[in-house]
């Protein structure tokens, strides 16, 4: 079982070294860069990664294209702001030693937000398929929230993939603006009609679910911030969709 780790990048000099250095269990590290103007490519090459520059195809398209360029059929897909925990790396080493029993594997993703590891708020365990056989699985999702769809059996790894999210509220707001635009474009492309009632009521429900039902209050001030931002995300997504329709 040989593994190619793939990462798609655009101006990720802040994160790329941490991601690459966590991938000692992989047999190849492949970076597909879509036009970085910072030191992303330079840093990746210095750390031994193979770098290919390619035009943007959308999140799922870019990740599928990256998998197609890999030297090995097993793909370990990370985002640039993610890294394997030492425990997850050891688990993958063990999987390589004993051989895979499934065609794809999910991992729990643990997020760090404003300097705090988030254990509630609907953010954990946030399982994602990140290790998969490209002959049996591929990425889907035209706009945002892409995911791996497997045609075979899916197993589960137990150790955490670490996700280093926003260090500041201004960074979170920039990310939120970008992703709500993509989500609204997806709704518009599917010709989904968004009634005004959803713009008014859904943000309040999102806050209630995140902060109370998903126990965001246990994540302290950061949990309260996540709940407010989740509500604002919902409001912006539906408002933008109505404007686009």
Image (cartoon, rainbow, N blue to C red):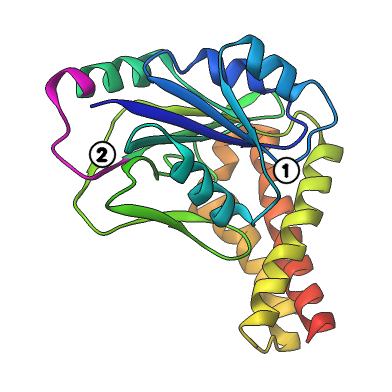
Instruction: Please tell me whether residue 99 belongs to the stretch shown in magenta.
Output: yes
Q: Which residue is mark 1?
A: 225
| Residue placed most toward the observer, 190 or 96 | 96
**Residue 231, located in which quarter of the rendered image?**
bottom right
Image position, residue 89 (x, y; %): 36, 17
Q: Which residue is mark 2?
A: 156
Residue at point 72%, 23% (across, down): 41
Residue at point 60%, 16% (across, down): 18
Residue at point 29%, 50% (across, down): 135
Q: Quadrant of the N terminus?
A: top left
**22 relative to 167, above or below:** above
Q: On the rendered structure, is 70 left or right of 242?
A: left
Question: Cα distance, mark 2 to mark 1?
Answer: 30 Å
Highlighted magenta segment, given as a residue range:
96-105
Q: On the rendered structure, is 92 left or right of 115?
A: left
Q: Secondary structure at mark 2?
A: strand
Image position, residue 155 (x, y; %): 22, 42
Counting the numbered discs, the total is 2
Image position, residue 127 (x, y; %): 39, 44
**220 relative to 183, above or below:** above
Q: Quadrant of the C terminus?
A: bottom right
């Amino acid at each position: 079982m040989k593994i190619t780790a793939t990462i798609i990048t655009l101006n990720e000099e802040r994160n790329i070294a941490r991601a690459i250095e966590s991938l000692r269990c992989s047999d190849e590290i492949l970076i597909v860069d879509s036009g970085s103007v910072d030191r992303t490519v330079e840093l990746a090459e210095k750390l031994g990664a193979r770098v290919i520059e390619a035009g943007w195809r959308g999140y799922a398209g870019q990740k599928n294209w990256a998998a197609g360029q890999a030297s090995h059929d097993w793909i370990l897909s990370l985002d640039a702001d993610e890294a394997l925990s030492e425990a997850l790396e050891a688990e993958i080493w063990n999987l390589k030693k004993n051989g895979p029993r499934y065609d794809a594997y999910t991992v729990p993703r643990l997020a760090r937000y404003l300097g705090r590891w988030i254990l509630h708020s609907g953010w954990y365990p946030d399982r994602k398929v990140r290790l998969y056989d490209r002959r049996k699985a591929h990425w889907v999702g035209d706009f945002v929230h892409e995911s791996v769809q497997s045609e075979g059996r899916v197993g589960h790894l137990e150790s955490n993939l670490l996700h280093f999210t926003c260090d500041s509220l201004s960074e979170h707001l920039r990310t939120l603006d970008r992703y709500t635009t993509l989500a609204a474009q997806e709704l518009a492309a599917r010709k989904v009609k968004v009634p005004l009632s959803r713009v008014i009521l859904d943000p309040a429900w999102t806050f209630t679910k995140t902060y109370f039902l998903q126990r965001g209050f246990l994540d302290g001030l950061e949990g309260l911030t996540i709940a407010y931002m989740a509500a604002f995300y919902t409001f912006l997504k539906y408002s933008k969709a109505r404007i686009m329709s």
